[in-house]
């Protein structure tokens, strides 16, 4: 028996960041949206543990740890320890989400691994337990399980679905050079020494989602990490300007960057923006959201 679980990339439509907590984490108020870029995790029975990772040509394979440090290894050990079973499986990860790009590709892999191994090992882990294990693996992992659109609080790991009846179209321009999330948070602390303990709320963004109007959503997009990320990578500001000049309603960084996102009015408009950007950038992707979280796509 083998099975494949697919998990989506995330973007942050709103990302409010507060001053560091005593535990070192920053409190967040964020609105996640899952978009149609996916990593696939395939598992099958094995007498031991093996892990392989494949990436498309435009992703730097060296940026993806294959053994030991890979979050899939950690997910397997955590799930196995929770149930007192051996972490035996043959696992392969097919990546298509930009790496170190602010789109939570590693978190998607962890969520997909939890679902896949739970099925492979016939554990029937309750949803609440899976979400708790996911939160131990990383702040974005619970949302990768949930998908759709959700409000995230705490350090982002506490997720609550929110209504989002529209379909939103995005153009994605990955960067060939990654950007360290811890480095972006350190720069945020340097640039915002008086950041509030409680970050900015997401009320305006949630109202924009309810409107279903792309122009209203464009005006409500918010990312407290964009300034620090652009301070570290000023070249990304040029990419954002290119996309808006090409017709995007709004350009912004995805999370801590360096992936650049562009909200388009429609699917046709997104393709037009992508076509213009493709003249200057090797990889330009068109996608939409919200989409489902980690889910089984093949089983047999």
Image: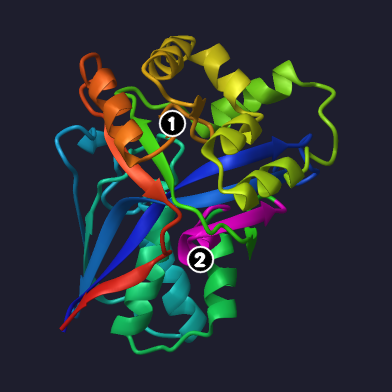
Asked if residue 237 can be seen in this view, the reply is yes
Q: Residue at x 30, y 74 (%)?
A: 296
Residue 206 versus residue 74 in the image, above or below = above
- Taking the magenta stretch, the answer to whether it contains residue 16 is no
Q: Residue 162: horizontal and vertical position, in percent?
A: 63, 61
Residue 84 versus residue 109 in the image, above or below = below
Magenta residues (range): 139-154
Q: Residue 107: horizontal and vertical position, in percent?
A: 44, 53
Q: Secondary structure at mark 1?
A: strand
Image quadrant where one finds the N terminus? bottom left
Q: CA distance from mark 2 to mark 1?
A: 22 Å
Q: Secondary structure at mark 2?
A: helix
* 134 or 260: nearer the viewer: 260
Number of the label disc, if any, that sits on residue 146: 2
Q: Residue at x 44, y 35 (%)?
A: 265
Q: Nearer the viewer, mark 2 or mark 1?
A: 1
Name the image colouring: rainbow
Residue 54 versus residue 131 in the image, above or below = above
Q: Quadrant of residue 171?
A: top left
Is residue 198 toward the left or the right of residue 188 in the image? right
How many numbered discs sit on the rendered protein? 2
Q: Residue at x 34, y 22 (%)?
A: 177
Q: Residue 195: horizontal and vertical position, in percent?
A: 81, 28
Number of the label disc, if any, that sits on residue 261: 1
């Amino acid at each position: 028996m083998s099975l494949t679980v697919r998990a989506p990339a995330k973007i942050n439509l709103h990302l409010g960041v507060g001053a560091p907590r005593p535990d070192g984490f920053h409190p967040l108020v964020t609105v996640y949206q899952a978009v149609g870029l996916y990593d696939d995790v395939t598992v099958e029975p094995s007498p031991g543990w093996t892990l392989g990772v494949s990436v498309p040509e435009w992703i730097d394979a060296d940026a993806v740890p294959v053994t030991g440090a890979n979050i899939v290894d950690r997910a397997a050990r955590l799930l196995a320890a929770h149930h007192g079973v051996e972490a035996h499986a043959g696992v392969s990860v097919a990546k298509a989400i930009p790496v170190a790009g602010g789109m939570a590709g590693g978190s998607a892999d962890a969520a997909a691994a939890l679902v896949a191994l739970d099925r492979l090992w016939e554990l029937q882990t309750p949803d609440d337990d899976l979400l708790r294990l996911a939160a131990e693996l990383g702040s974005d992992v619970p949302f990768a399980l949930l998908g759709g659109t959700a409000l995230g609080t705490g350090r982002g790991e506490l997720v609550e679905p929110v209504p989002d009846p529209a379909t939103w179209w995005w153009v994605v321009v990955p960067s060939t050079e990654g950007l360290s999330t811890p480095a972006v948070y350190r720069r945020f602390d340097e640039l915002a020494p008086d950041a509030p303990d409680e970050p900015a709320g997401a009320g305006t963004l949630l109202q924009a989602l309810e409107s279903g109007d792309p122009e209203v959503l464009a005006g409500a997009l918010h990312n407290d990490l964009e300034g620090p990320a652009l301070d570290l990578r000023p070249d990304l500001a040029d990419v954002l300007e290119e996309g808006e000049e090409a017709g995007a309603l709004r350009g912004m960084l995805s999370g801590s960057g360096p992936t650049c996102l562009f909200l388009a009015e429609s699917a046709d408009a997104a393709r037009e923006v992508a076509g213009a950007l493709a003249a200057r950038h090797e990889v330009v992707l068109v996608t939409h959201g919200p989409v489902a979280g980690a889910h089984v796509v093949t089983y047999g």
